[in-house]
């Protein structure tokens, strides 16, 4: 019997009970650890969803094409040229980008800007097109879809607003709308912009204060446009307002958001 046992233990089918028990216990431990890991991960996901899951939303870069009729190192020269441009119906907006650039208008489309620049140059007022753009941003947001949509709209609305002012400016230039009606349209656009600014909540993430500041600057630009003071009339004021909105959007995005 002992000889048979000795031969069996030497056979490839033999496995000591002790090793078998160890393997069974090891398998149970692994299974238990796996269950605990899944439970912890599940609890963390539930807690994160309850408190608002943080993720990243991409805000695309926006381009603006400014038509400039002068570039100078001296603000006095820029102011003189801007006044002359206002009196002829141009924006006369001064943008400090190292030099003082005197802007005649701003466009969402490069082709439109190039056409206007050529027309001005052919008329004896040399003009160049300058491209300015907002940087691409990555904004944290939660799993609240309505809030995310609102924040995204707040970032994209300035480009929409510039487009609406551009359309209004074309109508004024073509005498398709009277100045009083154009001013009324500007007031309506301001009210629409203010309603969007009022929707900026204190919980709109890391850019809340920056968005409020940018929209307050937009409102200041509207105030200046509505109190245009007669230089160039409404025709000039609307172009200047469009330039101011575009410039503030670019400057705020570069200096505050980025």
Image (cartoon, rainbow, N blue to C red):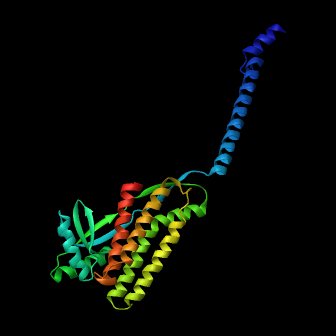
Q: Residue furthest right?
A: 1
Left or right position of 92 against 178: left
Left or right position of 12 against 255: right
Compared to residue 117, the image places residue 18 above or below, namely above
Q: Position of residue 80 (x, y in %)?
A: 19, 73
Residue at screen point 20% across, 69% down: 78
Q: Is residue 144 visible?
A: yes
Q: Position of residue 163 (x, y in %)?
A: 40, 76
Q: Is residue 107 visible?
A: no
Left or right position of 73 against 199: left
* Closest to the observer, 4 or 191: 191
Q: Residue furthest top?
A: 2
Position of the N terminus, as image quadrant, is top right
Compared to residue 123, the image places residue 56 above or below, namely above
Compared to residue 155, the image places residue 180 above or below, namely below
Q: Position of residue 248 (x, y in %)?
A: 36, 65
Left or right position of 31 against 173: right
Residue at screen point 71% across, 36% down: 36
Position of the C terminus, as image quadrant, is bottom left
Q: How many marks?
A: 0
Q: Position of residue 128 (x, y in %)?
A: 21, 72
* Closest to the observer, 27 or 167: 167
Q: In which quarter of the view is residue 135 placed?
A: bottom left
Residue at screen point 49% across, 65% down: 154
* Closest to the observer, 39 or 245: 245
């Amino acid at each position: 019997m002992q000889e048979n046992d000795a031969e069996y233990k030497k056979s490839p089918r033999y496995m000591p009970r002790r090793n078998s028990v160890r393997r069974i216990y090891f398998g149970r431990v692994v299974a238990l650890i796996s269950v605990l890991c899944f439970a912890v991960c599940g609890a963390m996901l539930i807690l994160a969803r309850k408190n608002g899951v943080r993720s990243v939303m991409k805000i695309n870069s926006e381009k603006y094409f400014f038509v400039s009729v002068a570039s100078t190192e001296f603000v006095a020269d820029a102011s003189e040229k801007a006044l002359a441009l206002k009196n002829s119906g141009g924006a006369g907006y001064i943008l400090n980008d190292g030099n003082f650039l005197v802007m005649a208008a701003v466009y969402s489309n490069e082709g439109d800007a190039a056409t206007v620049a050529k027309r001005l140059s052919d008329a004896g007022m040399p003009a160049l097109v300058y491209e300015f753009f907002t940087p691409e941003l990555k904004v944290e947001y939660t799993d609240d879809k309505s809030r995310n949509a609102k924040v995204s709209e707040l970032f994209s609305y300035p480009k929409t607003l510039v487009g609406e002012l551009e359309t209004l400016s074309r109508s004024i230039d073509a005498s398709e709308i009277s100045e009083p009606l154009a001013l009324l349209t500007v007031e309506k656009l301001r009210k629409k912009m203010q309603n969007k600014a009022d929707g900026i909540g204190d919980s709109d993430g890391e850019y809340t204060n920056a968005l409020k500041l940018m929209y307050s600057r937009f409102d200041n630009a509207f105030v200046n446009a509505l109190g245009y003071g007669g230089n160039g009339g409404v025709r000039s004021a609307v172009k200047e307002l469009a330039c101011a909105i575009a410039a503030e959007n670019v400057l705020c995005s570069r200096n505050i958001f980025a």
